Amino acid sequence: MPHSFPLRVYYEDTDLAGIVYYANYLKFIERARSEWVRDLGIDQARLKAEGGGVFAVRRVVADYRAPARFDDMLDVTTDYLSHSGARLELRQCVLRDAKLLFEAQVTLVCLADTGRPQPLPARLLAALREIITN
């Protein structure tokens, strides 16, 4: 079952046409990913401090399907797709009611303090096993 993050569109999120500015969808899915990781029981600041690495976006393939507008209530979903080594693949969607407005496949990589890839943290792998088996 996908993780769900509710979000309201504010005036600052829109452009002159009154629709959500395209780059803001990336901010929306970033917030939702942070909440997904938090809901998995992972404190990202603590993980970094303990040498567990940080997550960086490696790739985003995005599809803008319909506009969101000022004051819309949106639902940003995050679905686990796969992982291997230092890489994590997610599907993220922005919906208004049941209508798909935006969809992205996001590739994250875990990085050490040196900026080099490092294996995904054991805590995350344990949480992903729970997702996979349920």
Image (cartoon, rainbow, N blue to C red):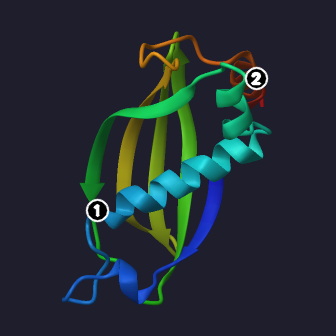
Residue 24: where, in percent of width, then height?
Answer: 35, 66
Residue 1 visible in rendering = no
What x and y, as percent, mark residue 14? 31, 82
Please name whichever residue, 9 or 132, is drawn nearer the observer in this view of the structure: 9
Residue ID for mark 2: 123
| Label placed on residue 11 | none
Marked residue nearer the N-terminal end (1 or 2): 1
Taking the spot 51% from the left edge, 20% from the top edge, the residue there is: 113
Report the side of 33 relative to 58 (left or right).
right
The residue lying toward the viewer, choosing from 111 and 61, is 111
**Does residue 120 lie above or below 106 as drawn?**
above
Q: Quadrant of residue 4?
A: bottom right
Residue under the image location 42 percent in, 59 percent down: 27
Q: What secondary structure is marked by label 1?
A: loop
In this rendering, is residue 58 above or below 103? above
Along the horizontal axis of the image, is 10 left or right of 40? left
Q: State which quadrant residue 11 falls in.
A: bottom left
